[in-house]
Amino acid sequence: MSLKAFLKGKKVHFIGIGGISMSALAKYLKSEGYAVGGSDIAVNEEISLLEEAGIPVRIGHDPSAVAGADAVVYTDAVPADDPELAEARERGIPCYSRMQLLAAVAEGFTSVIAVAGSHGKTSATAMCAHILLQSGARFTAHIGGRDALLDNFYASGKEFFVTEACEYRKNLLAFERVTAAVWLNCDKDHMECYRDFDELRDTFLRFAARAARSFVNADDANIRPPENALTFGVSTQNCDYRAVSLRESGERYAFTVLERGEKLCRIRLRVPGAFHVYNALAATAVMRGFGVDIKSIVRGIASFTGVRRRFEKIGKYGGAEFFCDYAHHPAEIAKVLELARRRGSGRLFVVFQPHTYSRTRFLMDDFVKVLSGVENLIIFKTYAAREPFDRAGSAYALHERTGNSLYAESVRELEAYMKKSVRGGDTVLFLGAGDIYYHARRLLQKLGGRPVPGRKGRGGQNSTGSPLDVKE
Protein backbone atom coordinates (compact mmCIF):
# COMPACT_ATOMS: atom_id res chain seq x y z
CA MET A 1 0.00 0.00 0.00
CA SER A 2 1.37 3.44 -0.91
CA LEU A 3 2.05 5.98 1.81
CA LYS A 4 -0.69 8.31 0.51
CA ALA A 5 -3.23 5.50 0.63
CA PHE A 6 -1.96 4.49 4.07
CA LEU A 7 -2.09 7.98 5.62
CA LYS A 8 -5.34 9.67 4.58
CA GLY A 9 -4.46 13.02 6.17
CA LYS A 10 -1.41 15.18 6.71
CA LYS A 11 -1.23 15.44 10.51
CA VAL A 12 0.50 12.47 12.19
CA HIS A 13 1.11 11.97 15.91
CA PHE A 14 3.88 9.59 17.08
CA ILE A 15 3.59 7.90 20.49
CA GLY A 16 7.12 7.07 21.63
CA ILE A 17 8.73 9.41 19.11
CA GLY A 18 12.10 9.42 20.92
CA GLY A 19 13.01 5.89 19.81
CA ILE A 20 15.64 5.49 17.13
CA SER A 21 13.34 4.04 14.47
CA MET A 22 10.34 6.21 15.34
CA SER A 23 12.37 9.41 15.14
CA ALA A 24 13.73 8.46 11.72
CA LEU A 25 10.20 7.77 10.45
CA ALA A 26 9.01 11.09 11.87
CA LYS A 27 11.80 12.88 10.00
CA TYR A 28 10.91 11.06 6.81
CA LEU A 29 7.24 12.06 7.01
CA LYS A 30 8.22 15.67 7.69
CA SER A 31 10.48 15.61 4.61
CA GLU A 32 7.44 14.40 2.63
CA GLY A 33 5.33 17.35 3.74
CA TYR A 34 3.41 15.85 6.65
CA ALA A 35 2.70 17.81 9.83
CA VAL A 36 4.44 15.66 12.43
CA GLY A 37 4.48 15.76 16.22
CA GLY A 38 4.73 13.29 19.05
CA SER A 39 5.16 12.39 22.67
CA ASP A 40 7.44 10.34 24.88
CA ILE A 41 7.83 9.57 28.56
CA ALA A 42 11.08 11.49 29.15
CA VAL A 43 13.48 13.87 27.46
CA ASN A 44 16.45 12.36 25.68
CA GLU A 45 18.99 13.71 23.22
CA GLU A 46 16.95 12.68 20.22
CA ILE A 47 13.87 14.58 21.39
CA SER A 48 15.93 17.75 21.63
CA LEU A 49 17.17 17.18 18.08
CA LEU A 50 13.64 16.54 16.81
CA GLU A 51 12.48 19.84 18.30
CA GLU A 52 15.45 21.61 16.69
CA ALA A 53 14.27 20.13 13.38
CA GLY A 54 10.81 21.64 13.89
CA ILE A 55 9.03 18.53 15.19
CA PRO A 56 7.20 19.34 18.46
CA VAL A 57 7.34 16.75 21.25
CA ARG A 58 5.27 16.51 24.42
CA ILE A 59 6.74 14.87 27.52
CA GLY A 60 4.23 12.55 29.13
CA HIS A 61 1.26 10.80 27.61
CA ASP A 62 -1.83 13.04 27.62
CA PRO A 63 -5.03 12.01 25.80
CA SER A 64 -5.46 15.56 24.50
CA ALA A 65 -2.23 15.20 22.49
CA VAL A 66 -4.03 13.26 19.75
CA ALA A 67 -6.67 15.93 19.15
CA GLY A 68 -6.72 16.92 15.49
CA ALA A 69 -4.47 14.07 14.36
CA ASP A 70 -5.35 12.31 11.12
CA ALA A 71 -3.32 9.24 12.14
CA VAL A 72 -1.41 7.92 15.13
CA VAL A 73 1.76 5.84 14.95
CA TYR A 74 2.91 3.94 18.06
CA THR A 75 6.04 2.04 18.99
CA ASP A 76 5.98 -1.55 20.21
CA ALA A 77 7.06 -0.28 23.64
CA VAL A 78 3.68 1.45 24.09
CA PRO A 79 1.19 -0.68 26.09
CA ALA A 80 -2.32 -1.30 24.77
CA ASP A 81 -3.82 0.81 27.57
CA ASP A 82 -1.66 3.87 26.85
CA PRO A 83 -3.95 6.90 27.37
CA GLU A 84 -3.08 8.53 24.04
CA LEU A 85 -3.55 5.30 22.11
CA ALA A 86 -6.83 4.59 23.89
CA GLU A 87 -8.09 8.12 23.18
CA ALA A 88 -7.17 7.88 19.51
CA ARG A 89 -9.07 4.65 19.13
CA GLU A 90 -12.05 6.11 21.01
CA ARG A 91 -12.08 9.04 18.56
CA GLY A 92 -11.84 6.70 15.58
CA ILE A 93 -8.41 7.98 14.54
CA PRO A 94 -6.52 5.37 12.47
CA CYS A 95 -3.71 3.86 14.59
CA TYR A 96 -0.71 2.11 13.07
CA SER A 97 2.28 0.34 14.54
CA ARG A 98 5.80 1.50 13.76
CA MET A 99 6.30 -1.51 11.53
CA GLN A 100 3.11 -0.90 9.56
CA LEU A 101 4.29 2.62 8.75
CA LEU A 102 7.80 1.42 7.88
CA ALA A 103 6.38 -1.14 5.46
CA ALA A 104 4.19 1.53 3.81
CA VAL A 105 7.17 3.89 3.48
CA ALA A 106 9.17 1.15 1.75
CA GLU A 107 6.49 0.81 -0.94
CA GLY A 108 7.40 4.24 -2.31
CA PHE A 109 10.86 3.19 -3.52
CA THR A 110 12.09 1.49 -6.65
CA SER A 111 14.29 -0.99 -4.73
CA VAL A 112 14.10 -2.04 -1.08
CA ILE A 113 17.12 -3.42 0.80
CA ALA A 114 16.10 -4.93 4.15
CA VAL A 115 18.76 -6.21 6.56
CA ALA A 116 17.75 -8.90 9.06
CA GLY A 117 19.56 -11.06 11.60
CA SER A 118 20.00 -11.48 15.32
CA HIS A 119 23.15 -9.32 15.41
CA GLY A 120 24.81 -6.66 13.27
CA LYS A 121 21.78 -5.21 11.46
CA THR A 122 22.62 -1.60 12.20
CA SER A 123 26.24 -1.75 11.07
CA ALA A 124 25.44 -3.70 7.90
CA THR A 125 22.60 -1.30 7.04
CA ALA A 126 24.90 1.68 7.55
CA MET A 127 27.60 0.09 5.36
CA CYS A 128 25.07 -0.34 2.56
CA ALA A 129 24.10 3.33 2.92
CA HIS A 130 27.73 4.44 2.78
CA ILE A 131 28.27 2.50 -0.45
CA LEU A 132 25.15 4.03 -2.00
CA LEU A 133 26.37 7.48 -1.00
CA GLN A 134 29.73 6.88 -2.67
CA SER A 135 28.03 5.57 -5.83
CA GLY A 136 25.95 8.71 -6.26
CA ALA A 137 22.66 6.81 -5.99
CA ARG A 138 19.48 8.60 -4.92
CA PHE A 139 18.48 6.77 -1.76
CA THR A 140 16.95 6.95 1.69
CA ALA A 141 18.42 5.18 4.72
CA HIS A 142 16.54 4.21 7.88
CA ILE A 143 19.32 3.15 10.28
CA GLY A 144 18.72 1.65 13.74
CA GLY A 145 21.54 3.63 15.35
CA ARG A 146 23.42 6.86 15.02
CA ASP A 147 25.95 6.50 12.22
CA ALA A 148 28.97 8.79 12.54
CA LEU A 149 28.28 10.34 9.12
CA LEU A 150 24.64 9.69 8.22
CA ASP A 151 22.97 9.47 11.65
CA ASN A 152 19.75 7.43 11.74
CA PHE A 153 18.08 9.00 8.70
CA TYR A 154 19.38 10.14 5.35
CA ALA A 155 17.35 11.08 2.29
CA SER A 156 18.51 12.04 -1.18
CA GLY A 157 15.96 10.26 -3.37
CA LYS A 158 13.76 7.24 -3.96
CA GLU A 159 15.84 4.90 -6.05
CA PHE A 160 16.78 2.78 -3.02
CA PHE A 161 15.37 2.36 0.48
CA VAL A 162 17.79 0.66 2.89
CA THR A 163 16.44 -0.35 6.30
CA GLU A 164 16.67 -2.85 9.12
CA ALA A 165 14.14 -5.66 9.38
CA CYS A 166 13.55 -6.63 13.02
CA GLU A 167 12.37 -10.08 14.06
CA TYR A 168 10.55 -8.84 17.20
CA ARG A 169 6.90 -9.96 16.91
CA LYS A 170 7.71 -11.13 13.36
CA ASN A 171 7.84 -7.50 12.26
CA LEU A 172 10.11 -8.32 9.32
CA LEU A 173 7.25 -10.16 7.62
CA ALA A 174 5.28 -6.91 7.30
CA PHE A 175 7.28 -5.86 4.23
CA GLU A 176 5.14 -6.55 1.16
CA ARG A 177 7.99 -6.14 -1.33
CA VAL A 178 11.72 -6.57 -0.69
CA THR A 179 14.19 -6.43 -3.57
CA ALA A 180 17.20 -7.60 -1.56
CA ALA A 181 16.88 -9.35 1.80
CA VAL A 182 19.99 -9.82 3.96
CA TRP A 183 20.11 -12.59 6.60
CA LEU A 184 23.24 -11.96 8.64
CA ASN A 185 22.91 -14.66 11.31
CA CYS A 186 20.39 -16.53 13.43
CA ASP A 187 20.47 -16.79 17.21
CA LYS A 188 18.03 -17.16 20.10
CA ASP A 189 16.52 -13.76 20.86
CA HIS A 190 13.03 -12.31 21.36
CA MET A 191 12.01 -15.82 22.35
CA GLU A 192 8.99 -14.45 24.21
CA CYS A 193 7.52 -13.87 20.72
CA TYR A 194 8.12 -17.40 19.41
CA ARG A 195 7.03 -20.91 20.25
CA ASP A 196 10.60 -22.18 19.95
CA PHE A 197 13.83 -21.58 18.06
CA ASP A 198 12.55 -23.44 15.01
CA GLU A 199 9.71 -20.94 14.64
CA LEU A 200 12.18 -18.04 14.91
CA ARG A 201 14.43 -19.59 12.27
CA ASP A 202 11.48 -20.31 9.99
CA THR A 203 10.39 -16.67 10.28
CA PHE A 204 13.78 -15.46 9.08
CA LEU A 205 13.61 -18.02 6.26
CA ARG A 206 10.15 -16.86 5.17
CA PHE A 207 11.41 -13.26 5.10
CA ALA A 208 14.43 -14.15 2.98
CA ALA A 209 12.54 -16.49 0.63
CA ARG A 210 9.87 -13.88 -0.18
CA ALA A 211 12.41 -11.35 -1.47
CA ALA A 212 13.37 -11.05 -5.11
CA ARG A 213 16.91 -12.00 -4.02
CA SER A 214 18.39 -12.88 -0.64
CA PHE A 215 21.95 -12.72 0.67
CA VAL A 216 22.68 -15.11 3.54
CA ASN A 217 25.59 -16.08 5.78
CA ALA A 218 26.89 -19.48 4.64
CA ASP A 219 29.01 -19.89 7.81
CA ASP A 220 26.04 -19.79 10.20
CA ALA A 221 24.95 -23.34 11.02
CA ASN A 222 21.46 -22.11 11.94
CA ILE A 223 20.79 -20.72 8.46
CA ARG A 224 19.36 -22.79 5.64
CA PRO A 225 19.67 -20.69 2.48
CA PRO A 226 16.46 -20.34 0.46
CA GLU A 227 16.43 -21.02 -3.29
CA ASN A 228 16.79 -17.32 -4.14
CA ALA A 229 19.97 -16.92 -2.07
CA LEU A 230 23.46 -15.78 -2.82
CA THR A 231 25.83 -16.66 0.01
CA PHE A 232 28.71 -14.94 1.78
CA GLY A 233 31.20 -16.24 4.32
CA VAL A 234 34.75 -16.77 5.48
CA SER A 235 35.18 -20.47 6.23
CA THR A 236 32.75 -21.82 3.60
CA GLN A 237 34.77 -22.30 0.45
CA ASN A 238 32.04 -22.51 -2.18
CA CYS A 239 30.04 -19.41 -1.21
CA ASP A 240 29.36 -16.65 -3.75
CA TYR A 241 31.26 -13.97 -1.83
CA ARG A 242 34.12 -15.05 0.40
CA ALA A 243 36.67 -13.16 2.53
CA VAL A 244 40.22 -14.51 2.25
CA SER A 245 43.72 -13.30 3.17
CA LEU A 246 42.51 -11.67 6.37
CA ARG A 247 44.96 -9.33 8.07
CA GLU A 248 44.47 -7.59 11.40
CA SER A 249 45.98 -4.39 12.84
CA GLY A 250 44.64 -2.92 16.05
CA GLU A 251 41.59 -5.20 15.75
CA ARG A 252 40.75 -3.61 12.40
CA TYR A 253 40.64 -6.12 9.57
CA ALA A 254 41.53 -6.06 5.90
CA PHE A 255 40.59 -8.87 3.53
CA THR A 256 40.24 -9.81 -0.11
CA VAL A 257 36.78 -10.50 -1.48
CA LEU A 258 36.38 -13.38 -3.89
CA GLU A 259 33.32 -13.17 -6.13
CA ARG A 260 32.46 -16.72 -7.20
CA GLY A 261 36.10 -17.65 -6.78
CA GLU A 262 37.55 -14.67 -8.64
CA LYS A 263 39.33 -11.80 -6.89
CA LEU A 264 37.03 -8.79 -6.69
CA CYS A 265 38.65 -6.21 -4.38
CA ARG A 266 40.54 -5.58 -1.16
CA ILE A 267 38.44 -4.23 1.73
CA ARG A 268 39.90 -2.32 4.68
CA LEU A 269 37.70 -1.77 7.72
CA ARG A 270 37.99 1.31 9.91
CA VAL A 271 35.96 -0.22 12.74
CA PRO A 272 37.36 -2.80 15.20
CA GLY A 273 36.04 -6.33 15.50
CA ALA A 274 36.24 -9.46 13.36
CA PHE A 275 32.44 -9.65 13.24
CA HIS A 276 32.42 -6.60 10.95
CA VAL A 277 33.99 -8.77 8.23
CA TYR A 278 30.57 -10.43 7.81
CA ASN A 279 28.75 -7.09 7.79
CA ALA A 280 31.08 -5.79 5.09
CA LEU A 281 30.76 -9.00 3.05
CA ALA A 282 26.97 -8.76 3.20
CA ALA A 283 27.03 -5.11 2.08
CA THR A 284 29.45 -5.95 -0.73
CA ALA A 285 27.30 -8.84 -1.97
CA VAL A 286 24.12 -6.75 -1.97
CA MET A 287 25.68 -3.83 -3.77
CA ARG A 288 27.21 -6.11 -6.41
CA GLY A 289 23.72 -7.52 -6.90
CA PHE A 290 22.61 -4.01 -7.91
CA GLY A 291 25.61 -3.52 -10.18
CA VAL A 292 27.38 -0.95 -8.00
CA ASP A 293 30.97 -0.41 -9.12
CA ILE A 294 33.87 -1.84 -7.12
CA LYS A 295 35.42 1.56 -6.31
CA SER A 296 32.21 2.76 -4.66
CA ILE A 297 32.04 -0.42 -2.57
CA VAL A 298 35.64 -0.12 -1.37
CA ARG A 299 35.33 3.61 -0.65
CA GLY A 300 31.92 3.24 0.95
CA ILE A 301 33.05 0.62 3.45
CA ALA A 302 36.23 2.60 4.15
CA SER A 303 34.08 5.67 4.94
CA PHE A 304 32.14 3.76 7.60
CA THR A 305 33.71 4.68 10.94
CA GLY A 306 31.07 3.24 13.21
CA VAL A 307 27.71 3.64 14.87
CA ARG A 308 27.24 5.14 18.27
CA ARG A 309 27.26 2.58 21.09
CA ARG A 310 29.24 0.07 19.07
CA PHE A 311 32.46 -0.07 21.08
CA GLU A 312 32.32 3.71 21.29
CA LYS A 313 34.98 5.41 23.38
CA ILE A 314 33.17 7.97 25.53
CA GLY A 315 36.16 9.31 27.52
CA LYS A 316 38.88 8.76 30.09
CA TYR A 317 39.11 8.93 33.87
CA GLY A 318 42.32 8.56 35.86
CA GLY A 319 44.09 7.10 32.86
CA ALA A 320 41.35 4.46 32.33
CA GLU A 321 39.44 4.38 29.04
CA PHE A 322 35.63 4.25 29.11
CA PHE A 323 33.71 2.50 26.30
CA CYS A 324 30.03 1.84 25.61
CA ASP A 325 28.59 -0.95 23.51
CA TYR A 326 25.01 -1.86 22.60
CA ALA A 327 25.64 -5.57 23.26
CA HIS A 328 22.63 -6.99 25.09
CA HIS A 329 22.64 -10.63 23.95
CA PRO A 330 25.12 -13.25 25.25
CA ALA A 331 26.61 -13.82 21.80
CA GLU A 332 27.17 -10.08 21.33
CA ILE A 333 28.63 -9.73 24.82
CA ALA A 334 31.11 -12.54 24.13
CA LYS A 335 32.35 -10.79 20.99
CA VAL A 336 32.77 -7.37 22.57
CA LEU A 337 34.51 -8.85 25.64
CA GLU A 338 36.99 -10.56 23.33
CA LEU A 339 37.54 -7.28 21.50
CA ALA A 340 38.08 -5.35 24.75
CA ARG A 341 40.52 -7.90 26.10
CA ARG A 342 42.55 -7.94 22.91
CA ARG A 343 42.74 -4.15 22.72
CA GLY A 344 43.56 -3.42 26.38
CA SER A 345 46.60 -4.39 28.43
CA GLY A 346 45.26 -3.44 31.86
CA ARG A 347 42.33 -4.71 33.89
CA LEU A 348 38.83 -4.92 32.41
CA PHE A 349 35.79 -3.60 34.30
CA VAL A 350 32.33 -4.40 32.92
CA VAL A 351 29.02 -2.75 33.80
CA PHE A 352 26.16 -4.68 32.20
CA GLN A 353 22.55 -3.53 32.14
CA PRO A 354 20.14 -6.33 31.13
CA HIS A 355 17.56 -5.30 28.53
CA THR A 356 14.07 -6.63 29.30
CA TYR A 357 13.16 -9.26 31.89
CA SER A 358 12.03 -11.77 29.25
CA ARG A 359 15.38 -11.85 27.43
CA THR A 360 17.25 -12.30 30.72
CA ARG A 361 14.92 -15.08 31.84
CA PHE A 362 14.96 -16.98 28.52
CA LEU A 363 18.75 -16.70 28.14
CA MET A 364 19.77 -16.76 31.81
CA ASP A 365 22.15 -19.72 31.49
CA ASP A 366 23.86 -18.12 28.50
CA PHE A 367 24.24 -14.79 30.29
CA VAL A 368 25.73 -16.54 33.32
CA LYS A 369 28.17 -18.46 31.15
CA VAL A 370 29.47 -15.42 29.26
CA LEU A 371 29.68 -13.12 32.29
CA SER A 372 31.06 -15.52 34.89
CA GLY A 373 34.60 -15.10 33.56
CA VAL A 374 34.61 -11.32 34.08
CA GLU A 375 36.67 -10.45 37.16
CA ASN A 376 35.36 -6.92 37.74
CA LEU A 377 31.67 -7.19 36.94
CA ILE A 378 28.79 -4.95 37.97
CA ILE A 379 25.20 -5.84 37.07
CA PHE A 380 23.14 -2.66 36.75
CA LYS A 381 19.37 -2.55 37.24
CA THR A 382 17.29 -3.86 34.33
CA TYR A 383 16.08 -1.61 31.54
CA ALA A 384 12.52 -2.94 31.43
CA ALA A 385 11.40 -1.25 28.18
CA ARG A 386 7.83 -2.50 27.62
CA GLU A 387 7.75 -5.17 30.35
CA PRO A 388 6.41 -5.43 33.92
CA PHE A 389 8.74 -6.53 36.73
CA ASP A 390 9.73 -10.19 36.71
CA ARG A 391 11.93 -11.34 39.59
CA ALA A 392 13.11 -14.45 37.72
CA GLY A 393 14.42 -12.35 34.85
CA SER A 394 15.71 -9.40 36.85
CA ALA A 395 19.20 -7.97 36.98
CA TYR A 396 19.41 -8.98 40.62
CA ALA A 397 18.59 -12.59 39.73
CA LEU A 398 21.41 -12.50 37.18
CA HIS A 399 23.74 -11.03 39.81
CA GLU A 400 22.90 -13.89 42.17
CA ARG A 401 23.52 -16.50 39.47
CA THR A 402 26.88 -15.17 38.31
CA GLY A 403 28.39 -15.37 41.80
CA ASN A 404 31.20 -12.99 40.87
CA SER A 405 29.44 -9.65 40.47
CA LEU A 406 28.36 -6.56 42.33
CA TYR A 407 24.87 -5.14 41.90
CA ALA A 408 24.08 -1.43 41.43
CA GLU A 409 20.91 0.58 40.96
CA SER A 410 22.28 4.12 40.72
CA VAL A 411 25.04 6.20 39.20
CA ARG A 412 26.04 7.17 42.73
CA GLU A 413 26.92 3.55 43.49
CA LEU A 414 28.92 3.29 40.28
CA GLU A 415 30.73 6.53 41.08
CA ALA A 416 31.83 5.29 44.51
CA TYR A 417 33.05 2.00 43.06
CA MET A 418 34.97 3.57 40.18
CA LYS A 419 36.70 6.11 42.43
CA LYS A 420 37.91 3.30 44.67
CA SER A 421 38.80 0.71 42.04
CA VAL A 422 39.81 2.10 38.64
CA ARG A 423 43.35 3.16 37.79
CA GLY A 424 45.45 4.07 34.78
CA GLY A 425 45.63 1.51 31.98
CA ASP A 426 42.28 -0.08 32.84
CA THR A 427 39.35 -0.43 30.44
CA VAL A 428 35.80 0.23 31.66
CA LEU A 429 33.09 -1.20 29.41
CA PHE A 430 29.38 -0.36 29.70
CA LEU A 431 27.11 -2.88 27.97
CA GLY A 432 23.40 -2.81 27.21
CA ALA A 433 20.68 -1.56 24.89
CA GLY A 434 18.84 0.54 27.47
CA ASP A 435 19.74 3.83 29.13
CA ILE A 436 23.14 2.65 30.41
CA TYR A 437 24.75 4.85 27.72
CA TYR A 438 23.36 7.98 29.35
CA HIS A 439 24.26 6.73 32.83
CA ALA A 440 27.83 6.09 31.68
CA ARG A 441 28.22 9.60 30.28
CA ARG A 442 26.75 11.10 33.44
CA LEU A 443 29.08 8.97 35.55
CA LEU A 444 32.10 10.18 33.60
CA GLN A 445 30.99 13.76 34.20
CA LYS A 446 30.56 13.17 37.95
CA LEU A 447 34.00 11.59 38.14
CA GLY A 448 35.52 14.64 36.51
CA GLY A 449 36.79 12.58 33.59
CA ARG A 450 37.55 13.77 30.07
CA PRO A 451 34.61 12.95 27.79
CA VAL A 452 34.81 12.42 24.07
CA PRO A 453 32.27 14.79 22.46
CA GLY A 454 29.19 13.11 21.06
CA ARG A 455 29.28 12.63 17.30
CA LYS A 456 26.77 14.22 14.95
CA GLY A 457 26.73 13.12 11.34
CA ARG A 458 25.97 15.46 8.47
CA GLY A 459 22.93 13.41 7.47
CA GLY A 460 20.32 14.16 4.84
CA GLN A 461 17.14 16.15 5.21
CA ASN A 462 17.08 17.02 8.91
CA SER A 463 19.07 13.85 9.47
CA THR A 464 19.97 13.24 13.09
CA GLY A 465 19.54 10.32 15.43
CA SER A 466 19.32 8.87 18.92
CA PRO A 467 21.33 6.05 20.49
CA LEU A 468 18.36 4.83 22.51
CA ASP A 469 15.96 2.40 20.86
CA VAL A 470 12.94 1.93 23.09
CA LYS A 471 11.40 -0.38 20.49
CA GLU A 472 13.27 -3.45 21.70
Image (cartoon, helix red, strand yellow):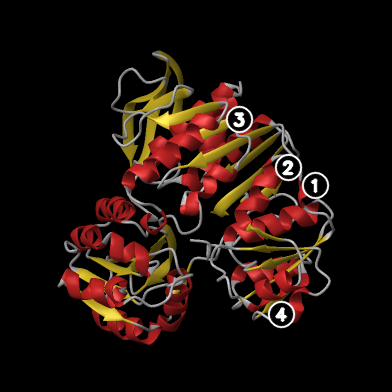
Q: Is residue 30 left or right of residue 424?
A: right
> Percent position (x, y) of residue 109?
72, 36
Neighbour class for label 1 at 10 Å: few (<14), some, many (≥20)? Answer: few
The residue singled out by tag 3 in the image is 179
Q: Which residue is mark 1?
A: 5
Question: Residue 235: x percent and y percent?
Answer: 28, 27
Mark 3 secondary-structure assignment: loop
> How far is mark 1 from mark 3, CA to CA?
22 Å
Q: Residue at x 19, y 75 (%)?
A: 400
Measure the alpha-carbon separation of dots 3 and 2: 16 Å
Q: Quadrant of residue 297?
A: top right
- For label 2, the crowd category at 10 Å Cα-Cα, with few meaning under 14, some 14 to 19 and many 20 or more, is few
**Label 3 vs 2, first from the N-terminus:** 2
Mark nearest the camera among 1 and 3 is: 1
Is the residue under label 1 in contact with that under label 2 (CB below 8 Å)? yes
Mark 4 and mark 2 lie on one chain; the one further toward the N terminus is 2
Q: Which of these two is toward me, 2 or 437?
A: 2
- What kind of element bears circle 4? helix
Element under disc 2: loop
Q: Where does label 4 land, which residue?
A: 63
Q: Amino acid at mark 4?
A: Pro
Earlier-in-chain disc, 1 versus 3:
1
- Is there any visible trace of residue 458 in the rendered image? no
Q: Nearer the viewer, mark 3 or mark 2?
A: 2
- In the rendered image, the quadrant that contains the N terminus is top right
The local crowd at label 4, few if under 14, some if 14 to 19, many if 20 or more residues have their Cα within 10 Å, is some
> Residue 85 at what x, y percent from top left?
66, 71
Front position in the image: 152 or 424? 152
Q: Which residue is mark 2?
A: 1
**Residue 406 in view in this figure:** yes
- The kind of residue on which mark 1 rests is Ala
Residue 285 picture location, percent across and down: 49, 26
